[in-house]
Amino acid sequence: MLAVSFLPELADPAHALVVLSGAADGFAGPAAAVDAATGGALTRAAKAARFEGEAASVVELLAPAGLACGRVLLVGTGPADKLDALTAERIGGAITARLLTSGETQVNVDVAGVLSADLAAHLAHGAALRAWQFLPYRTTMKPRQKPSLADLAIIGAADAAATYARLEAIAGGVARTRTLVSEPPNVLYPESFVDKSLDLAGLGIELIVLDDAEMRRLGMGALLGVAQGSVRPARMLAMRWNGTGRDDVKPVVFVGKGVTFDTGGISLKPPAGMEDMKWDMGGAGAVTGAMHALAARKAKAHVIGVVGLVENMPDGNAQRPGDVVTTMNGQTVEVINTDAEGRLVLCDAIWWAQETFNPEIVVDLATLTGAIIVSLGHEHAGLFCNDDGLAGQLSAAGAAVGEKLWRMPIGDAYDKLIDSDIADMKNVGPRDGGSITAAQFIGRFIKPGVKWAHLDVAGTVWAAKPGAVHDKGATGYGVRLLDRFVADNFEG
């Protein structure tokens, strides 16, 4: 992870230097000082690049005369009245994206008189998030391809360190999620997912692990039905963080779908693109990363994360279309399509979580349907919720951190579409409204009085191209959303 420091003044002028401006010319503060030292070269470079000060735009000045550094970046802030935490993070991400493989090992970002301490901390946060890359299996990279940037120093906002410490803990959770989502399926499977999570105990998280024998004893026929085609046994992992100092506070429960690889089972997916299904555990990854973030920053809240972990394979013992399975709460499900497996995992995981922890609020995250991508693309995750207040809290948290949600409808008219002729329900409805009927299925396993939200994150956990604060690949979506949801609503 990018090392970040906060200094009162420039300590080593030989490193790359970043200055900020929301204007095309007439620079102020550090940008004006650089322009003066270089005999107006910064103004000329900005004019040549048609720089207008827009947020996260970058002008690069190489080997500037009059300065000790090898390069200067002029980075736009946009209008001062629109410069918020998310914009600051975009600016930090733009700096990292430009310099990550540039050969520079450190960058000094002079924010004196330009950014408040809070905004400076968020700039550093965006830079750190954007610096993350997944490279353990890249053994033949050329030196010019490898990341060189290791250190970022914020100049002129030394009092931002305390704010950044909290953000750094969250970034650690995001990095954990991105790593889990990026691992290949021969490396990450239910048992190894648990193994890679055991170190959470070092942050003070209590861990509970159920093996397939225990889940069979509990009657989790839906989850185990998905897993029965794989040689990899299923696992359930629960993570408890109680930072309240009290035993009488009901927990908030997050539940994640953890299908570590999804072939579709007997209802086999098309071969093209099937390799992407290693990230079908993105919901479980987000829940695990969120628990890391909450514990690392010592959140004053009682939160439990539960992830159901399976591999969906087309073995001779695999679940068949037409099978009927019995869930933990006794309801029966006719399996119409074995590729609608995530809801079968979630229903048993959610019921067990309610039985075990007696929560008032349950939020599940799942890469559940391609239909949500058809509906919302990759800009929003789908939000399905039985409580307007909870929906508002989650939407506000997502907007605050740039992980956007769009509320979708649920109701009786959709619910009856999953009624079965031979069982209590079937695991898919008609083609129309596929993401909605998937949510309705999960909703049948929510106890009366429990506030519940389902986040369909199929379009947001993986990106085909880089974003403002992530490279292409795993985005870590959900970690910052859940952390902010807890911070805003469950910490005094």
Image (spheres, helix red, strand yellow):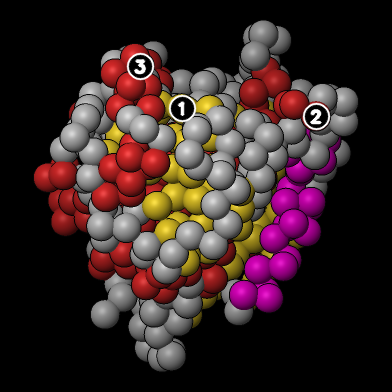
User: Does the stretch in magenta take in 193?
Assistant: yes
* Image coords of residue 441 (percent x, y): 40, 38
- At label 2, which amino acid type do we have? Pro
Point out the tag, 1 or 3, that comes first from the N-terminus: 3
The residue where tag 2 is placed is 143
User: Is the residue 62 above or below the residue 389 in the image?
Assistant: above
Image position, residue 323 (x, y; %) = 62, 29
Residue 216 makes an appearance in the image: no
Disc with the residue nearer the chain's start (3 vs 2): 3
User: Nearer the observer, disc 3 or disc 2?
Assistant: 3
Residue sitting nearer the eye, 134 or 20: 20
Secondary structure under badge 3? loop
Q: Position of residue 326 (x, y in %)?
A: 57, 45
Highlighted range, magenta: 181-203
Residue corresponding to mark 1: 60
Horizontally, residue 209 falls left or right of residue 165, namely: right
Label 3 to label 2: alpha-carbon separation: 29 Å
Callout count: 3
Q: Secondary structure at mark 1?
A: strand
Residue 428: quadrant of the picture: top left
Mark 3 Cα within 10 Å, few/some/many (few <14, many 20+)? few
Q: Answer above or below: position of 48 versus 302.
A: above
Main secondary structure of the magenta stretch: helix
Quadrant of the rendered structure where residue 89 is?
top left
Residue 145 lies left or right of residue 181; in this view the side is right
Using the image, tell me which numbered label, if any, was put on residue 49. Answer: 3
